[in-house]
Amino acid sequence: MLTRTDLGVVDKKRIMQARRSFWAYRQHIHPAMKKGWWQREIARHLQQFYEDFVAGKRPKLVIQSPPQHGKSEQVVDFISWVCGQNPDLRVIYTSFSDRLGVRANLRMQRLLDSAKYQRVFSDLRISSRNIVTVSAQVLRNREILEFIGREGYFRNTTVNGSITGEGLDIGVIDDPVKGREEASSETIRDKTWEWFTDDFFTRFSEHAGLLAILTRWHVDDPIGRFIERMPGVKVVSRPAIATEDEACRKKGEALFPELKSLEFLLERKSIMFPPYWEALHQQNPIIQEGELFKPDQIGIIDALPVDRTKWVRGWDLRSTVEGDWTVGVRMGRLDDGRYVISDVRRLREGPDVRDNAIINTAKADGIHTKVSLPQDPGQAGKTQALYLTRALSGYRVTSSPESGDKITRAEPVAAQVNIGNVLMLRAEWNDKLIDELRTFPNGTFDDQVDALSRTFGELLAARSGFFTR
């Protein structure tokens, strides 16, 4: 039987271990929690994240897993452990809703107030009173927890919330998109991405780390863009049901059977639309095929016809949204009434390079290819159209505002594609155009479709005798 002295020694060892190891800390704080290999694996990656942060490596960790698998609770526990290690750290936690942020805040308050926590990290304390805003006192409310006598704090906010004037050492993103409907909206995805790049990421200190935990909804969701464009991102992604043998489970086994059994997951799978199951539970977002274009009906040819083809090069100009393309599609109408796509140009450079590319492409196409440009509203759009028109003196250049939504503009050319009335010159750009047509309007990009729609519309409106080959 262990004596009181022995128990004291064991307890001290457990406390010391909890300070060094995040997994040991979780077991100390939550002795009755459900444990599984998945929980231990997340803890190991989080521990490595903190060690990399201390080493000045500016870590970026993305954890992708199904909903209701304990990731949010574990990350809040991790923040409390990190703040205990260094109470001078500034942590900003963001999520899609105020409710999630407040829940994380209250969980932090309960942890930091607990006797178990204070036995491990006695140097970190928060005010004993709930203070909404009191001058010269440490704040403790549902939006911020300031640590007594230290520089650090925990601040929770929402995506698109204000964090002006605040800095951070560790930024945490917990499910930045509310659900499938928001993730399917390009406007909302762009707005969320702009907030991350223009607000959230600008708050980072020199050696700050980024931690993101989420369920994937769309290939172009904010974290999808982050993974694609930011170097050095470490991604830990686990499906609800294994699709192949893994180190800790076999193909077909559940991720966290102690919490969500395989039977439970299969029941959910049976009632879900397959692409939604793949995204939400398997972390494998799939772009759904659109219903407008049937690109398999496009015939690919090795040489252009020699008849009197009428040509138009229609452009879609890159907007201010990061990731968009400027695209120019050259399309001709043949004597037999069919259409042929001869070239697609794509570029992401700024206005000067873009304008030069448009000018040089028109010169390469020749004077018998009409140039059609979208005219943005306002004086800036008119000025740009006037500049390009003057720069291409001697060429047929027209500009006009876009009218109607993208789908309405695309319907006429889609009708020709779907009856096999459109050909395409074999070239390296074929696959990207076909992919975009196939997924429109659900895909990541629609710039090629927009340019094609403009080109086709100009061909329909063109007067006969206007072109020669």
Image (cartoon, rainbow, N blue to C red):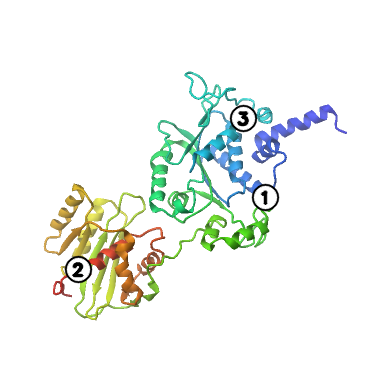
> Going 72% across and 39% down the picture, which residue do you hit?
31
> Going 18% across and 54% down the picture, which residue do you hit?
385
Of the 4 image quadrants, the one containing the C terminus is: bottom left
Is residue 213 shown above or below 300? above
State how far apart marks 3 and 1 are (Cα).
Answer: 26 Å
Amino acid type of the residue that numbered disc 1 sits on in the rendered structure: Leu
Is residue 212 shown above or below 180? above
Of the image marks 2 and 1, the number of the one nearer the N terminus: 1
Is residue 245 shown above or below 175? below
Residue 110 has which mark?
A: none
Amino acid type of the residue that numbered disc 2 sits on in the rendered structure: Ala
Q: Secondary structure at mark 3?
A: helix
Can residue 59 be seen by looking at this rendering?
no
Closer to the camera: disc 3 or disc 1? 1
- Choose between 154 and 54: the one closer to the eye: 154
Confirm or deny contact between disc 3 and disc 1 (CB under 8 A).
no
| Mark 1 neighbour density, 10 Å: few (under 14) some (14–19) many (20 or more) | some
Q: Position of residue 396 (x, y in %)?
A: 15, 64
Mark 2, residue position: 461
- Total marks drawn? 3
Q: Position of residue 288 (x, y in %)?
A: 46, 63
